[in-house]
Image (cartoon, grey):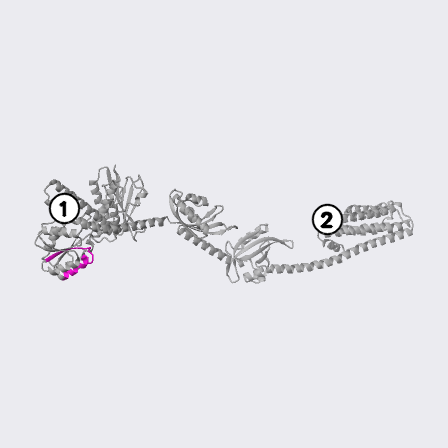
Amino acid sequence: MSVPLIQRIALGFGGDDATELRVRIFRLICALAAGLCLLVVAPLNLMQTLPWGVHLANGALGLAGGICYWQSCRGRHFIGSFFVLLVAVLDLVWFLNAGSDGSVTHYFYPVMLFVITLFQGRSRWMIALGLWLNVGLLYVLEHFFPSWVTPFPGVLDHLVDLETGIFCSFTALVAVTGFILTNYNREQRRVAETAARLAASEAEYREIFNSTSDALFVHAADGRVLDVNEQACSLFGLSREALLRAGVNDYSLNESPYSQSEAQVFIDRAMRGQSQLFEWRSKRANGELFWSEVALRRWEIGGDQRVIASVRDITQRKQDQESLRFSEERMRLAIWASDQSWFDTNLQTGNAQTSPEYSRILGYEHGELQTSLAMWRERIHPDDRPELERIFQHALKTREIGTMEYRLRTKAGTWKWIRSVGKVVELDAAGRPLRMVGTHMDISARKELEAQLLHSQRLEAVGTLAGGVAHDLNNILTPMLMASGLLREKLTEAKDRELMSLIEDGGRRGAAIVKQLLAFSRNLTQNRVPVDLGQLLIEVGQLLRATFPPEITVVVTAAAGQGRVEADPNQLHQVLMNLCVNARDAMPAGGTMTLGLERADQVAGPAAKAGPHLVITVADTGEGMAPEIMGQIFDPFFTTKPQGKGTGLGLASVHGIIKAHRGFVRVESQPGRGTVFRVFLPAREDWGMELAPVTAAVTPPPAEPLANTCILVVDDEPAVLLVTSRLLTRMGHQVIQAASGPEALQLLERHRAAVTIVITDFAMPGMDGPALVPLLRAISPALRVIGVSGQNQDHRMEALRVLGFSEVLSKPYEWEDLVHVIQRQIGALDRPA
């Protein structure tokens, strides 16, 4: 058998198998050496005449072979020592046994086989070369020193020695060859079995390779694709051959960062043992792009380092993630837009999580506010805690949704109204509430609007009541004012006339209060014309500087032509005077009052109208007001002035007048820091109309009355009817009294020819003045009708003239006012009605 075959057999075993083969060959050689030397060579040598050194060497070699075999079986393998002994014995016997003529030369062939079989690598060839040099040296020594060689004593010795050497060499070669052939056949079977297992393993590998749900690629270090599975072909729509020929760019977006260069970076990292996981924009054969998740890992295949790429289509997952992200973003924006935040509280530990909006609502930066159940309770307004705790415990007990409105302290120390909605969503093993989730909503603006609405409704209710009271007061004050004027002339004593003057002054004061009540309750806004607010503020400022104490500095920052509104100039003048008088009274020790005008293009608030507004500002540096007072300042009859110094109707009238002008009033004040009133009025953009004067009209004094006129007086109030009739009678007129509309019709039918003027009340039960007058005019078309009303009717005079009214006199009035009206109507009798 050739040496390469022996090498292949030895190298066919990996690790321990190769070592075991060498050991068995070594034991075979040791056994052959012991058996042949002691059982064959030794007896045959005794038949020859040989030196005793040959016998001793033969015996020593036999015993050494036996000892090495015994030690090898015990795990100690003296391969090198046995080889050295073997060569030494052969070299000694060479010279004692006839040199090259002896049988020793035959033994060097098994020794060479020994060297090739038992030694490995470079040492094998070095020892083999040394052995050949050793044999060559023996021939050289024999040639130059023939005396060193002991020849055979006879021919028989030579023959026996030769036969012995041939037999032993042949036996050794046969034994070793048989051993090698036996192991060769066995290894052939093992190779076949291994090949079968490898084929089965390959089939299993391919089955596993193809059965995975992910697409698999096997890459070389340079990125080339060496193998793919069936899922890769299906995922990318390419055949296996096409994928093996294609590069990364062929099934990727082929644009940075999804191109060959970036892919190679990931592959290089994986080759260094750094597993990679990343998302990739992949492309199918039809050009369709999709998202994939790629995992790279280094793997050794057939002794070579490879990179296994697992590719998974995550398009649906990306769409779900995007949908979830969009939904979360939409929810976050909805919560942010509605001033809400979510909370998630562990009811047993007290730990809580909130969204960033919660911190923003309370004025904190995100992450600055630490949230917990205990800290939430600590921030609640003390007045709200008992009710809030009751609702909270009820929600825990019933597992129902709990809704709570309360005040929370902000970072600045102020209070914000919060609406919390929460529900227990999780219980522990014992059935106790474990987790509550819900929302917090900032309702401070809503609470402010509700307060303004309630205040407006309260004022509306008070205004309705004030209107009714004013009507009754007018009926009381009207006869009082007219009677006091008549009676004062009949009194001769100065003291009596003084007392009557006091009564008359009281009536006039009551009449002024009634007018303010009516302005508040009925929103009287007559004679609306374009008014230049800048000019109005300038004129009011001039008036204030002339009348207010010198300790008060009046500053006007407005300019004429700065803006105008459609309004009643007299009532706006009244509004400004009321506000300025209040500002004066708030600065008893002096100060600065500032009148300003500005434009607001966008105004927010429950009473605000769409479009630009002009804002009149009246600011003072006075005492200011406490928050609890500011909520009542527009209520009728509420005043902080000393008794007798104010009626409490000034700001109520301001509110009523401005509301009737489709505007609203806002006030800002702090104790010790002064007060600022802002009056918002819808601005007019048209400048074509002539501006109305802002000064109040002056009524000319009445002329002397004319007598001998028959007047029908209609009023359901006996006192008014009585005083009016006496006054007219005293003036020399004939008076017919009627207490109701039907009665007036009957009397007019009876005295149609005599009656030329009718004085009728507006508000009467059954048939009021506007219903009565057309019927009266139907009976006598030439009648002059004077209406008497507790409300100012200037804003509807055109409609009243169509009904038949010639003029309207507002209650309460004095006798001079009535005389003046009678005079005008008598003067108009000769003209068409």
Q: Position of residue 630 (x, y in %)?
A: 30, 44
Pointer 1 or 2: first along the chain: 2
Q: What quarter of the picture does the N terminus occupy?
A: bottom right
**Viewer-side residue, 761 vs 304:** 761
- The CA distance from mark 1 to mark 2 is 149 Å
- Tell me the mark number nearer the camera, choosing from 1 and 2: 1
Rendered view: 727 above or below 236: above
**Identity of the amino acid at label 1?**
Ser
Element class at badge 2: helix
Q: What quarter of the picture does the C terminus occupy?
A: bottom left
Residue receiving disc 2? 122
Horizontal side of 685 relative to 761 (left or right) equals right
Horizontal side of 699 relative to 59 (left or right) equals left
For the record, the magenta segment spans 755-778
**Viewer-side residue, 174 vs 362:** 362
Residue receiving disc 1? 484
Q: Does residue 445 belong to the magenta stretch?
A: no
Q: Position of residue 354 (x, y in %)?
A: 45, 48
Name the outermost residue toward the left: 708
